[in-house]
Structures are given as C-alpha cells and as structure tokens.
Amino acid sequence: SVFFFGMDPVVFADRTFLGMAGIDWMSLPSGVVRETARYYRFDPSGELLSHVISAPFMEMKRLHLGEEGRATQTPVVFGKQTQMTAGNTVFWVGTADDYVLRQYRQDGRLLREVRLLDFASTPVTEAMVEEEVQRRLDASGMMGRMAPGAVDAFRKNLETMPIAEALPPYGDILVDAEGNLWVERYPAPGDERAERNIFDREGAWLGTLTLPPRFQLHEVGEDYVLGLWLSDLDVQVVRLYRLIKA
C-alpha cells in the first residue's frame, strides 16, 4: 500500500507516528462520498508496526469527466473533515459528525470521549458560500497551475456542490505541553474571531479562550502560545504570546 502523512502528522513522544493508507479514488462513484481512511502506526525508521484505527476521511464531491479513467474530487464546501492530533502516548480523533472527540492509546484502544453538550451549530449563509467558493478559486494561484480542462471541471464541481446546512462543529485540534486538548471554533468566512475550547487530559472542559484576531495557533507551551498572525496586507507574521492561566 501507499501511505500518506498529513501536514500536521500524528507523532508520539517515542517518535512512532501514524500514516494513512492511500484511498482508491478511481473506484468511487460520482457524487458526494466520504470514504473510510485506514491509519497505521510506524516506528521511527518507517517500519510498519500495526493497523491502529479506521475513521471517515472527508466529504468529497466526485465528478467523472466522461473520458475514460478521468475524474476529479473536490472537498465539499463546509463538509465534514476528520481532525487528528497526538499527545505523548495518546491521540485524539474528531470526525466532525457532532461535537464529540475521542481519545485513543497508541495501539488504537479507545480511552474516553469528550462532548460539548450545549453546542449550537452555525447555519451556513449564502454569503459564506460565495466567499468560500471564491477563496478556493483564488487560492495560491491554483488556477494558473491547472490545465484548462481541469479548471473547467473544478469550477463545475464547485457550481454543483451540495452545501452543508451548518458549519462543522469545530476546526483544527491540538494538544498542548500539559496534555490539554485545544479545539478550534470553526472559522466561518469573514469572521476573524479565533476561539478555542480547552479540555484537560481527562476530558473535563476547562473553558473557552479567545485568541487575537487573524491569528492561527500552531503550538501551546506551559506559558505561551505560538502561531501565525495575518496582517492587513495579508502578510504572515510569526507571533508568540504569553499565556497567563487563572
């Protein structure tokens, strides 16, 4: 099998890590699909140790182009996407079906679940959809790197994309230096607020922290938060803030 390792890889204190087996996209039908991803644990040298868990990947819109063997897939606008992050000897998984996150041991044994009982979903508006679609079209000069046929297929996929009724319950998740879980409030288009619900290592809710606007969190230490702040000129700046705990 071919394995993939995400932009935010799940790496444990003993330097073992998780990799995802490749998905056979070409075998999937047209329409909205959410294939199951299989995750495996590897040792520091890259030797496969064992299968750990299987979890939904993300909601994708598949479009067959009518030409033999050609198709494209695009993430559903505001679709569900599984989030994962590692602690020293455990990892957390959130499938975004509801406000539930699950903690597992390195070997895949389920330890506990965390739920936010008073969570209220945010309805998706037409303005949100328009801004998100335009962002995708403009992102990273992507259109200039794609062949004309692929550009047309990408646009068609977006134009015919089913839209979720509500935003996902959360965005990114990470574990801090003390083992607490930080869960991002899903960043709605046009909303610069940056909030995190924080749960301790046993799953108890500690509170909600509001971070500076336009700030993307990457690391939390015992007394600091580190991340990228986006200026008014859309320039990314590394910023370190002191974290003062109650």
Image (cartoon, helix red, strand yellow):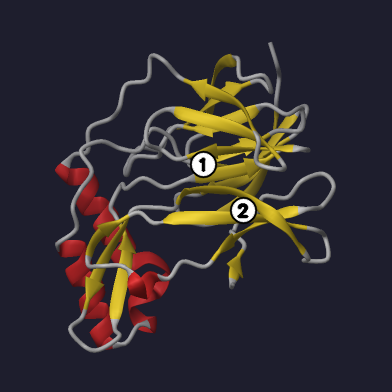
Q: Residues within 10 Å of mark 2 (few under 14, many from 20)?
A: few
Q: Nearer the viewer, residue 38 or 215?
A: 38
Residue pictured at 20% horizontal, 79% vertical: 152
The amino acid on which the numbered mark 1 sits, given as a three-letter code, is Asp
Quadrant in which residue 26 is drawn: bottom left
> What residue is rendered at 34% in x and 40% in y?
188
The spot of residue 199 in percent (x, y) is 60, 21
Q: Earlier in the sequence, mark 1 or mark 2?
A: 2
Real-space CA distance between mark 1 and mark 2, rounded to the nearest whole angstrom: 10 Å
Q: Evaluate whether residue 218 shows in this view.
A: no
| Quadrant of the rendered image containing residue 66 | bottom left
Q: In screen coordinates, is 55 left or right of 133? A: right
Q: Secondary structure at mark 1?
A: loop
**Splitting the image into 4 quarters, where does residue 174 fall?**
top right
| Marking on residue 8 | 2
Q: Is residue 49 left or right of residue 142?
A: right
Residue 67, image x, y percentages: 21, 88
Per the image, label 2 sits on a secondary structure element best described as: loop
Above or below for 217 versus 10: above
Quadrant assignment for the N terminus: bottom right
Vertical relation: 126 (above or below) 159:
above
Image quadrant where one finds the C terminus: top right
Badges 1 and 2: C-beta atoms under 8 Å apart? Answer: yes
